[in-house]
Amino acid sequence: MAGSVGGPRILLRRLREVMAEPESAQKRLDKIVVLIAANMVAEVCSVYLMNGARELELSATEGLKPSAVHATRLRVGEGLVGDIAAHARPLNLADAQSHPGFAYRPETGEEIYKSLMGVPILRSGKVVGVLVVQNRTKRHYTEEEVEALQTVAMVLAEVVAAADLITAEPDDAGFRQPRSYHIPGASFAEGIALGHAVLHEPRVHVTKLIAEDTELELKRLEQAVYALRGSIDDMLETEDLSHAGEHREVLQAYRMFANDRGWLQRMLEAVNTGLTAEAAVERVQNDTRARLQRAADPYIRDRLHDFDDLANRLLRQLTGVTLASLSANLPNDAIIIARNMGPAELLDYDKDRLRGLVLEEGAPNAHVSIVARAFGIATVGRAEDILQHVEPGDAIIVDGDTGEVYLRPSQEVIASYSEKARFRARKQEQYKAIRGEPAITLDGEKVALYVNAGLQVDLPHLDEAGAEGIGLFRTELQFMIASTLPSLRDQIELYRAVLDEAGDKPAVFRTLDIGGDKMLPYMNLAAFKEENPALGWRAIRISLDRPALLRHQIRALLTAAAGRSLRIMFPMVAEIAEFRRAKALVEKEIARLEKFGKEKPALLEVGTMLEVPSLVWQLDTLLPEVDFVSIGSNDLLQFLFASDRGNPRVATRYDFLSPIVLSFIRHIVRTCRAHGTPLTLCGEMSGKPLEAMALVGLGLRRISMSPAAIGPVKMMVRSLDTAKLAAFMDGLYDLPDRSVREQLAAYAEENGIAI
Ligand code: PEP
Ligand code: MG
């Protein structure tokens, strides 16, 4: 058996020379196949390229009949060449004709060749063709030869991309004009956005493939891998998870892969075949992708994402491309595409340029979705495989209402969505028109609508939306976006701005709700290493264990509210004792004010979130001690159903419009009413018109939501007859159904309620 002549490095050098020659694209390709055949000691070398009809067209050959060039075409999946393209993996066969997939094409004259080695030609992970060598004898190609051919195929991919070697037709659905995609996902934030794709973690496109100095490339690769390992270790150690939007599990997978000796070894070998360090990373990634893609197990396919991310990080390390330098060039109609991200990362983008957000993963009640809703950014989550199809700058439409994404949409789709966007704009006009009107039902019931907020940028929304006040001010957002703990002065400043904006309207400040998926980059708390963060050391639990932090915050609130009204609310209270301890800290701070002769708030109310089910069983004892309560439906229902709000597999498994939830909330409403305690619901449930209708129907009269939801919910309230709805809902609470969504929607439709 003959090996390759002079090895792949010589071949790559010769290829580079051919690429530099001022030849036509076809001539260059014809020369390349001759070169490869000679170097690999093969009688045949053929290149098949994807044409406009997504067929693999024989585009150049040494050894097969020249008349077959541009005549022989195979569908993806057809024959051995089609098989290689379909699975994006090499085939190495000593006796090709005995393979069940062999498809005989008489026009090529290939019947005399026994052995075949073929590899996919991949660009940015996508198959653009197939490169094949054949021999008359039953030759066993070695692993090294397969590797060498893959390296050559990679260089060929660049030749193909640079020249006009794809036989594209005008309606090309293939490589040059990538096809349109309709990707169904889930609605995370309503709204329609037409814009251009920006990859949150952009892929680095490798352009320099052939090394000039292999020793240097080996060193660069090793250094980059060490630096990458170090940065992953740092991230895991500093717990900088919220800012990076990473989950511990993903980082741990990165660490495992990054330390895998086989991975580094394979990349070093690829450099030794003559590639640059960057090209070697991509080469090995193509192989890994092909191997993992074959796995049916979703866990393994998830790991493929991890591996893709990791390879991309390594490429950024090598090329020095940083995320910050890329987000500086954000277009005016940016639609961010990410696998997942944390709320702080979304806040890093210039909000004025953001139109939409598409996540491959995520969950509707995860905090990044809440922030997206607060900003009115149309968001679709669980858009499967979008990262595989999207290219930076692609035209893209995000339909946050239906949870769909259109990638590279046709003119018809664009026209229809432009119409939809105009329709929404008209709706917005209608909402604006009722901005000054009260939210009063047809039978005269007043429903107070409040906004949820958390940042200075949210404040103008209070007035714009025509809300009655701020039902929930998430103070932790200020802590999450800062790079160090906000000082007392920073906190006072923000709280003063909130109170100034609110004027006579009430504003409810929720004390720090951190932990779970809301981590602070600078806290560096070893105790956050938890198996179940949602059930772990979070919110009031941290505040009570580290009272200095809470006292500091209360001090800031009391100072900002001197002479004015102040409403403080504690998160995640699970038992009365916790509320009492937290309230005692407020009293201590008041005593401190008195001691120093400082002005106190003119009115002080202290309440609690109701978001841990246990507290519902202490309501009769709790309510006389609190000034108000607010249901946090996001957490309350995640705990009620034991269903992680941030885990896409289970987050929407249970419908919140179920008899269980409705009767549970009705019980709270009735108990609060009996005690005369004001009750609000400030979770995401109240921002959806149908859910809000059900909440009003079961007796709630105060709901707080993202500002963008006020218009639609007010419209719903003003078209509602509460007495009639309550009577209808009486028949729902005891039903065994898992959901009564359809019944409620039908009721709304029949009764002309604006949903
Ligand atoms: C809730 O849990 O419903 C809530 C309003 O709080 P957060 O979403 O901030 O946890
Ligand atoms: Mg909560």
Image (spheres, rainbow, N blue to C red):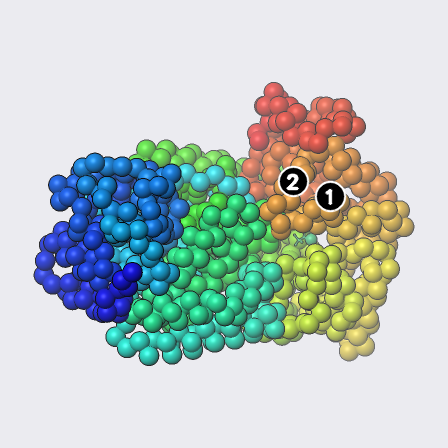
Amino acid, disc 1? Phe
Amino acid, disc 2? Arg
**In the picture, which quadrant includes the C terminus?**
top right
Judge left or right: residue 333 versus residue 626: left
Q: Where is residue 328 in the image (x, y as percent from the top left)?
A: 38, 64
Q: Residue 96 carries which label?
A: none
- Establish if 88 lies above or below 223: above
Residue at horizontal 33 percent and vertical 57 percent from the top: 141
Q: Do the residues labelled 2 and 1 touch (CB within 8 Å)?
A: yes
Residue at horizontal 34 percent and vertical 55 percent from the top: 140
Q: What element carries label 1?
A: loop
The residue nearer to you, when weighing 302 against 657, is 302
- Establish if 700 lies above or below 160: above
Disc 2 crowd, CA 10 A, few/some/many (<14, 14-19, 20+): few
According to the picture, the residue beneath numbered tag 1 turns out to be 641
Disc 1 crowd, CA 10 A, few/some/many (<14, 14-19, 20+): some
According to the picture, the residue beneath numbered tag 2 turns out to be 653
The residue nearer to you, when weighing 625 against 1, is 1
- Establish if 297 lies above or below 517: above
In this view, which residue lies farthest toward the top?
750
Q: Is mark 2 on a helix, strand or loop?
A: loop
The residue nearer to you, when weighing 150 against 227, is 150
Q: Earlier in the sequence, mark 2 or mark 1?
A: 1
**In the picture, which quadrant includes the N terminus?**
bottom left
Residue 327 appears in the figure: no
User: For the residues marked 2 and 1, what is the alpha-carbon distance in whole angstroms?
Assistant: 9 Å
